[in-house]
Amino acid sequence: MRIELITIGDELLLGFTIDTNAAHLARELAAEGVEVARRASVGDEAADIAAAVQEALDRTGAVITTGGLGPTSDDLTKPAIAALFGREMVFDESIWEGLRRLWASRGWAGEPPETNRVQAMIPAGARVLTNRHGSAPGIWLEDERGRWVAMLPGVPREMRGMLADEL
C-alpha cells in the first residue's frame, strides 16, 4: 500500500513548530510495510488543504492528515475535506457528549464553551476515530471509489495515541 502524509498548520510552515508528526507516522507506517510515497505541509487555508488532499488522492488514493481539527477559527481540515468529498458537515451528538464528559472529568465548571461544538461537526458519512488522549476526534472519510482520508489531530501526543488505537 502507498500513502501520502499531509501535515496542516501555519505554525509548521512558519517554523514556529517542528513537524514531528510526519516523521513519527512515516516510521510507524514503514514498520507495518506501508510505503509513504510523499510528505507535504500546508497552511491553514481551506483551499490549500483541499488542493493538497486532492493531489494526494489522485496519486495514491490514501492520505493521512494531521492538524486542523481543533475548535479555533483556523481549524479548517474537516470542512475543507468534506467539501472536497461533496459532503455536508453534520453535528454528531456522541462527540459532543464525549466532550462534555471530558470537560467534567477535568474538573472544569459548567459546559464546554460553544466554540468547542465545532469539534462535534463531522462530514456526513464519516467514521469517527476516538481520541482517548484529548478533545479533537479523528475522522475517516472514504469516497465511492475506495479512496480515503484519515484526519488526525495535530497535537503529537494525541496523534500518536490515535495512530496506535484507531488505525
Image (cartoon, helix red, strand yellow):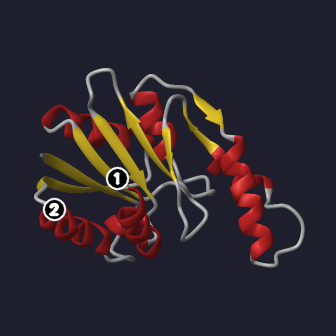
Residue 101, picture quadrant: bottom right
> Picture coordinates of residue 95 (x, y %)?
66, 49
Q: Are there few (<14), some (14-19), or many (20+) residues within 10 Å of tag 2?
A: few
Mark 1 or mark 2, earlier in chain = 2
Amino acid at dot 2: Glu
Question: Residue at (34%, 26%) from the top-left corner?
Answer: 143
Query: Depth check: 129 or 152 in front?
Result: 129
Q: Where is mark 2, residue-wise?
A: 32
* The C terminus - image quarter: bottom left
Q: Is residue 41 above or below residue 117?
A: below
Query: Depth check: 147 or 77 in front?
Result: 147
Give the numbered dot on residue 65.
1
Question: Residue at (49%, 25%) from the top-left corner?
Answer: 87
Question: Residue at (56%, 26%) from the top-left corner?
Answer: 88
Q: Helix, strand or loop at disc 1?
A: strand
- Give the left or right position of residue 126, taking residue 105 as reference: left
Q: Are there few (<14), some (14-19), or many (20+) residues within 10 Å of tag 1?
A: many
Residue 60, picture quadrant: top left
Q: Helix, strand or loop at disc 2?
A: loop
Total number of numbered discs in the rendering: 2
Question: Residue at (13%, 64%) from the top-left corner?
Answer: 30
Query: Depth check: 16 or 119 in front?
Result: 119
Give the numbered dot on residue 137.
none
Q: Is residue 51 above or below residue 96?
A: above
> Picture coordinates of residue 92 (x, y %)?
66, 40
Amino acid at dot 1: Thr
